[in-house]
Amino acid sequence: MYRFSSGLLAQKVAKGKEGEKLLVIKGSEEDNVQVSSSQWQLHRVTDEGRFWKLKDKIDFSVFKRPVDENSFFELQKDIDVFNSQKLHPAIIHGFENELSRLRPDSSKNLNNKYKNFVEFISTEFSIVDIIKDQSNLANYIDDYGPSLIAISENKCFLLPELPPIYRAPVSWRLLTWIINNHFSGPYPEELDLEMKKLLNYKKFFWEPLEIPDNLKTPVIEGIVYLLISKFVIIHENWERTTQSDKLIDEESSPLMQFMNLVQFEGERPWQILY
């Protein structure tokens, strides 16, 4: 099962005697985007969710990473078909309010620390005005990455339902794709020794990739850290949904770890790729 930023839940299931492969999606249809697709067909709607299948009845994989980088361009082409006019909330209300938007029940204390972190990043990397720039916008989804596509026989299919599509700086698309396709972390102190060795004793890990020199700038680095914070929030939300019996201590949460490592301990995970 995968939980998107908007609360949309998706899962691949097998149904019937022949084990037909279906994608079941739960969540508000009103708050999300239903795709007019030539590949997907709505199979049935039940209390369990909306069941979709590929029209040519072939098997597919979902929520796998890393995927081939060509998939980024396929996703970009499919997303650009939509005519969204909604500005991303971070442009309207400021990135410092992204935690409260993505997790409305987050505490005042954590929100204050998140706002302080965003202020630090914005000042440290001189991006205060850049993240509000509306001169070069493109269609964007908070979950921009492999989770938005199904792959079958080396072909990509946009999922039949998507989280909201916003207008945001065009650079966010590639950077969010890189994060969602390649990044993981921060890793907790409790890891066993063998895993720490595999990670080269680092708190962050990137699946192998090379980034061009134009992405090795302070401005891009600062934007990446804000987008990673959003990535961590979304994944924490997923854990809260799938492990409702597990209490997440804010002070030791991945988000708090990430903020502390970057803001107070000088960790620079983006520079691992330089």
Image (spheres, helix red, strand yellow):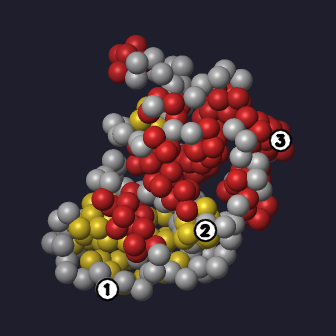
Category of crowding for the residue at label 1, using alpha-carbon neighbours closer than 10 angstroms: few (below 14), some (14–19), many (at least 20): few
Category of crowding for the residue at label 2, using alpha-carbon neighbours closer than 10 angstroms: few (below 14), some (14–19), many (at least 20): some
| Mark 1: secondary structure | loop
Q: Which residue is mark 2?
A: 137
Give the vertical position of 157 relative to 118 (above or below).
Answer: below
Q: Residue at x 56, y 48 (%)?
A: 231
Q: Amino acid at mark 2?
A: Leu
State which quarter of the image contains the C terminus: top left
Picture coordinates of residue 136 (x, y %)? 61, 66
Which of the two discs, 2 and 3, labels the residue nearer the N terminus? 3
Picture coordinates of residue 170 (x, y %)? 55, 62
Q: Which residue is mark 1?
A: 38
State which quarter of the image contains the N terminus: bottom left
- How far apart marks 2 and 3 lie (CA) works out to 29 Å
Give the vertical position of 230 relative to 145 (above or below).
Answer: above
Task: Locate residue 100: give its quadrant.
Answer: bottom right
| Mark 3: secondary structure | helix
Residue at the far top in the pictured view: 193
Q: Residue at x 52, y 35 (%)?
A: 270
Answer left or right for 128 relative to 62: right
Circles 1 and 3: CB atoms closer than 8 Å: no
Give the vertical position of 51 relative to 254 (above or below).
Answer: below
- How far apart marks 1 and 3 lie (CA) works out to 46 Å
Q: Which residue is mark 3?
A: 112
Answer left or right for 232 relative to 35: right
Which dot, 1 or 2, sits closer to the camera? 2
Give the vertical position of 34 relative to 193 (above or below).
Answer: below
Which of the two discs, 1 and 3, labels the residue nearer the N terminus? 1
